[in-house]
Amino acid sequence: MDAISVRDVTKSFSTQRAVDEISFDVPEGSIYGFLGPNGSGKTTTIRMILKILMPDSGEIRVLGKDLDDKTSNRIGYLPEERGLYRSMRVEDQLVFFGALHGLSTAEARRRAHVWLERFDAGDWAMRKIQELSKGMQQKVQFIGTVIHDPDLVILDEPFSGLDPVNTRLLKDVMLELRARGSTVIFSTHQMEQVEKSCDRIMLIHKGRKLVEGLLSRIRQEHGGDVVQVEYSGELPREAVKDLVESINDQGQYAEIRLRREEDAPALLRRLVGACDVRRFQIAEASLDDIFVRVVEAAK
């Protein structure tokens, strides 16, 4: 059974169509990345899945049925706009979140302390939310999202405000949730965050689905002609322009998309003659590169 099934869903605000006939399925027990730039329709779609907004047309099923109160208690939702009560203590806030999903006070408190220790934050329990940094508040909000052991976890921009250490910790927890059988769907515009953790992805742009499916298959379909180069000096753009489709140059690292895969040796010879090449590797295209070429093709 699919954890989420969306069929031909459309949503408009005044004359602006935010979501345009989107269809997709999220298999149970998977990590699903819902990707696209800000304003692409990701949050609107999530809110329709949760019945915060109602679609203008189309059908949405969650955990095998139309969403009702009983099904809602099987879902954990981390909204993009964080919703913590600033004057409450961390422990009280988490107990409150647990109670909203049917946990007793004692059980919610026990789980809160387990999760705080998991996040190396046991000494935060008696502190008020307003005393915490943005990253610390983000972790409290995440604990409140999963404290009731939901079958479906929906995270909207979950990495916002987290440093690299805590970003990795959050990814580890997401993998643990999947290992326990939960389904995780999260939206982000930071595509590099999902390349090594998602089973399936959907790329959305201006309310329209551009690409959807297994990440490995999407890479096969859209990759294979990308070269990763680490270098010193100046990249000789003019000297290689007849060989390349595009260059994503970041100063000392570049991803170069070839016109033809067989031109890689010729590209290497020209680069070596013009700059100090430390690494030259034919690789799968990054999600950023795939997204750019798909958007360009859709214009």
Image: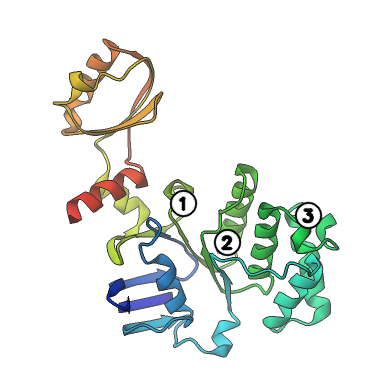
- Toward the front, the furthest residue is 14
Q: Nearer the viewer, mark 2 or mark 3?
A: 3
Residue 30 x %, y %: 47, 64
Residue at disc 2, secondary structure: helix
Q: Gap in Å between the C-alphas at discs 2 and 3?
A: 24 Å
2 or 3: tag closer to the N-terminus? 3
Task: Tell me what residue is drawn at x 27 percent, y 43 percent.
Answer: 223
Residue at disc 1, secondary structure: loop
Residue at disc 3, secondary structure: loop
Residue 99 x %, y %: 73, 81
Q: Nearer the viewer, mark 1 or mark 3?
A: 3
Q: Gap in Å between the C-alphas at discs 1 and 2?
A: 17 Å
1 or 2: tag closer to the N-terminus? 2
Residue 258 x %, y %: 21, 32
Q: Nearer the viewer, mark 1 or mark 2?
A: 1
Q: Tell me, yes or no, whether the two marked residues, 2 and 3, touch with CB atoms within 8 Å.
A: no
Q: Which residue is mark 3?
A: 121
Q: Which residue is mark 2?
A: 179
Relative to 170, say whether 78 is above or below: below
User: Label 2 sits on what residue type?
Assistant: Ala
Instruction: Locate residue 129: give its quadrant.
Output: bottom right
Q: Nearer the viewer, residue 287 or 28?
A: 287
Question: Crowdedness of circle 3 by 10 Å Cα count: few (<14), some, many (20+)?
Answer: some
User: Label 3 sits on what residue type?
Assistant: Ala
- Toward the left, the furthest residue is 242
User: Label 1 sits on what residue type?
Assistant: Val
Q: Which residue is mark 1?
A: 194
Residue 153 x %, y %: 55, 69
Relative to 261, say whether 195 is above or below: below
Question: Crowdedness of circle 1 by 10 Å Cα count: few (<14), some, many (20+)?
Answer: many
